Amino acid sequence: MTTKQAKVRTNRDRLVAISVMGEVSAPKMRAPYRVGHDGVARVGPATGGIVYNVRVGDPAFGWAGDHVEPGVSTKDPKEEHVNMAYNTLSCVGNRVRVVSGDAKGATGVVTGKHGGVEHVLVDFDPEVLDKLVIGDKVLVRAYGQGLEVEGFPGVKVYNLDPDLFEKMGPEVVGDGDDRRLSLPVTAEIPAHLMGSGLGSTSASSGDYDMTTQEPSVLAELGLDRLRLGDIVAIKDASAFYGWSYRRGAVIIGVVVHSDSKISGHGPGITTLLTANRGEILPRLDSGANLALLLGLRSDMGPKGG
C-alpha cells in the first residue's frame, strides 16, 4: 500500500545565509556570426544584458536568438574567484536586491545559472527592467547550498532555495526501503538528448544543455513545448560530482535559457536535485514552472513549438 507523508523535512535551519554580489552583465561576442549544426551562419542576440521581452514562463523555443537568457544576466566581471563564489552560492529562488543606480531598492529572484559565461540569471518586474542599466550592482541573499532532505541520504541537492523546494510540493511515497521523494515536473527528458555540459566535474554552478538537432524527436516527446522556468526530469542521468549517463539515475532541474542552433546545445538546465538509485520519483504537473511557483507572473501566454 502506498502512503504519503505531508511534511518533508530538511536541514534548512542549519544552512548559512550569506551575501554575494554581482552586476548586470554586458552582452559579449567573439564574432558577429554563430554557425549552426545546419551550416548556416546567424546573427542575433545571445547571452548577457537586460532582456526586456523574454521571461521565465515564456517558450524556450522559437526566439530569434541563441542561448537567450531571460530577464537580467549578472556576474562579477572583475575577479574570477569572486564570480565563482557568486555563481556557486546563488541558488534558484534566492532573493535579489538592486543596490545601485535608478532601480536601487528593487527586488527580484534568481531563476538559473548559465555555465560558460558564468551568469546568474535574475527575474525582475518589467518596470524594474526599464530602470536598470549595464553595470548596476545586485546583492543576492545566497541560501541553499548544503541543503539535505532528511531520510534520503541518496538524494543530493544543488542550487535550490529551501523555500522554493517547499513550494514544489515534495512528497514521500512508499514505505521502508521503497520510500521515494516525489517531485513535480512538466516533462521527462531521456539522457541521450543531453549534450553540452556532459562530463563537467560540478553541478553546483552552470547548466546542462538538451540538444535540439532532432526536432522530430523533440516534437514526439513534447519537448518542443518546454518553457523557460519549467521544472523537468532528466532520466538515466546523474549529477553526482558532474553530469553523466547512469542507468536508473535521475536529475531534477530547471530550464534556464532558450534553444540553440549550435551542435550539442539547446535549452539549458540547472540542476536542483539528483539521485542515482531511484530515490526520486518525478510526477507530471503542468504547473511546475518558476513563474507560477514563485508568483512571478499571472499569465504565461501560448505554449512554444
Image (spheres, rainbow, N blue to C red):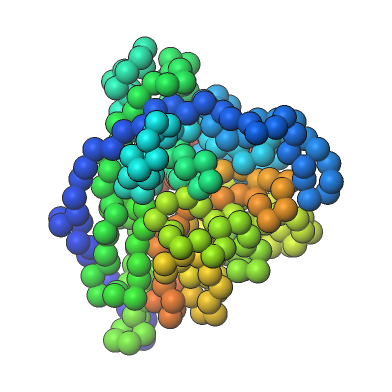
Residue at horizontal 53 percent and vertical 69 percent from the top? 244
Residue 28's x, y, as percent?
A: 58, 30
**Number of numbered tags placed on the structure image:** 0
Tell me, yes or no, if residue 285 can be seen here. Answer: no
Residue 245 figure quarter: bottom right
Tell me, yes or no, if residue 260 can be seen here. Answer: yes
The answer to whether 12 is drawn above or below residue 21 in the figure is: below
Residue 131 figure quarter: top left
Residue 47's x, y, as percent?
A: 58, 35
Residue at horizontal 32 percent and vertical 87 percent from the top? 177
Residue 27 figure quarter: top right
In this rendering, position of residue 215 left or right of residue 74: right
> Residue lying furthest left in this view?
13
Residue at horizontal 35 percent and vertical 14 percent from the top? 101
Residue 189's x, y, as percent?
A: 60, 64
**Quarter of the image with the N terminus in it:** bottom left
> Residue lying furthest top in this view?
102
- For this rendering, which residue is in front, 155 or 174? 155
In this rendering, position of residue 8 left or right of residue 300: left
The answer to whether 11 is drawn above or below residue 180 in the figure is: above
Residue at horizontal 43 percent and vertical 39 percent from the top? 120
In this rendering, position of residue 12 left or right of residue 238: left
- For this rendering, which residue is in front, 104 or 163? 104
Residue 168's x, y, as percent?
A: 37, 55
- For this rendering, which residue is in front, 7 or 107? 107
